[in-house]
Amino acid sequence: MTLRGRRRSRPLCYVHRGKDQDRAVVETCTRTIHGLPLLRPGPGTNELIVGALGRAAEYYDVPLYGFATAGNHYHCLSGPQNGLQLSRFQCHLNSNIAREVGRRHGHREKFWARRYRALNISDEKKSQRDRLKYVLANGTKEGLVESPLDWPGPNLARALVHGEPMVGYWYNRTKEYKARRKGVDFDPYDFATRYEIHFQQLPAYADDSPEAYRQMVADLIGEIEEEAADKRKGRRVLGVERILAQDPCQPIGTPKKSPAPPLFKADTSDERRAMENKYKDFVDKYDVASGKMLEAAIEGYRLDPRRLFPDGSFPPALVEEILRSASSFNPALEFPCGGEFPGGSFPRPWPFVGGGLPPAPSDPPTRRLVIEEIDGKDTIVWREEGIPTVEVAAPSRASARSRPRLLRRRRLRSPPRAA
């Protein structure tokens, strides 16, 4: 059994590695909800964002090649080894940014608009150079500042050209909570970890000297400044003061709704086609493995997902899908969480705690709306089992053509007064 040809709401988490490369180059982008400038630059916000980035990179051992924020979204150039590492890194980064920055701005609702978008970059020099230039240009190409060096947020340009590391703090909220419970006074930095992020050279430029790499980045900054000046046509930029004065909880204009970016970035069509073919083979193997897992559940035996799915991937959350598909074939199946689930029921995402499994849900009463003739009048009747019948009187002159209109809500007129 295979699951090929299924339409997906989003592409599979996939990381493309070039020839003889242990790591890939992936650009990820995540936007805030409704385009709110929740990532607006500021001393406290910058520390929280960089601290979350440094914590995630250290925890999952992901090298960083670039990072930039633009008020309502961010771009990150990283080097994960596989899709699982990328997924966990992004989950840790986005969740901590949303928690810490939302707490600072008093934003308690949803923080991110959607899941992150990943762009796999080929191992060609021009492709990696172009994406680094795009990340550096954030804030300048929109007419906010004149140069990437002037951006008040986490500044990648100064980190790469002048060697200034991005500095941030990750706060241990658990220790802070315990200290408050004990009535201990503490400084905000007593339970904080300082992170200094030093960005690595792109894999395509790994053989270049640090001086040559800094000169390449300086040339990119010069190109960005010239292109932005030509685009402004003499208009003034917004400026740092007005950027810092923005309200992070008020939207700025209409949110940008551009189509999803492509999955791959390559300089030549042959390279891009090779990356797409490799991804198609990956999807085919993934679908075959998913089909085998589903077939094993229907037949009543187990398989090890690690031996079925292709390298660099991770199995999906198949429990609900397997039960939903298998309940009509085998109404009682054994699963790792123990016990048997009756047909039509679903397990909890964790093993059920208590004396055995919960009872099977009872079937809901059948409910239907009919029009019957009662005492010479057409009457709308709810027919249900175990629930009293509700009768609604309808005009007697209703014809077969007008009967469906009786189901709509209409204004009741008062009866005529007696003469």
Image: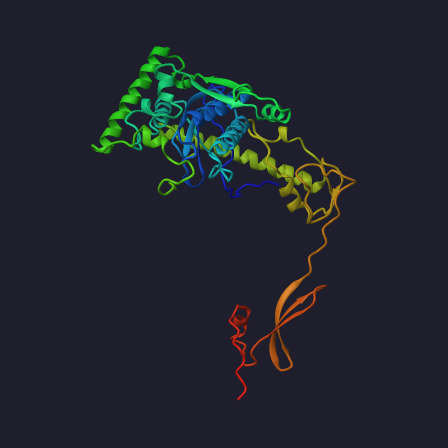
Residue at x-position 24% and y-position 29% = 229
Quadrant of the image occupied by residue 349: top right
Rendered position, 406 above or below 214: below
**In the depicted view, which residue is nearer to us: 371 or 100?**
100
280 sits left or right of 373 in the view: left
Image quadrant containing the N terminus: top right
**In the depicted view, which residue is nearer to us: 61 or 205?**
61
**In the depicted view, which residue is nearer to us: 262 or 215?**
215
The colour scheme applied to this rendered structure is rainbow
Q: For the view shown, which residue lies furthest in the bottom direction?
A: 419
Q: What is the total number of numbered labels drawn onto the structure image?
A: 0
Residue at x-position 33% and y-position 19% = 217
- Residue 219 coordinates in the image, percent (x, y): 29, 19
**In the depicted view, which residue is nearer to us: 44 or 285?**
44
- Residue 370 coordinates in the image, percent (x, y): 62, 70
Rendered position, 268 above or below 108: above
- Residue 159 coordinates in the image, percent (x, y): 38, 18
Residue at x-position 22% and y-position 30% = 230
213 sits left or right of 87 in the view: left
Quadrant of the image occupied by residue 301: top right
Q: For the view shown, which residue lies furthest in the right direction?
A: 355
Q: For the view shown, which residue lies furthest in the left direction?
A: 234
- Residue 322 coordinates in the image, percent (x, y): 65, 42
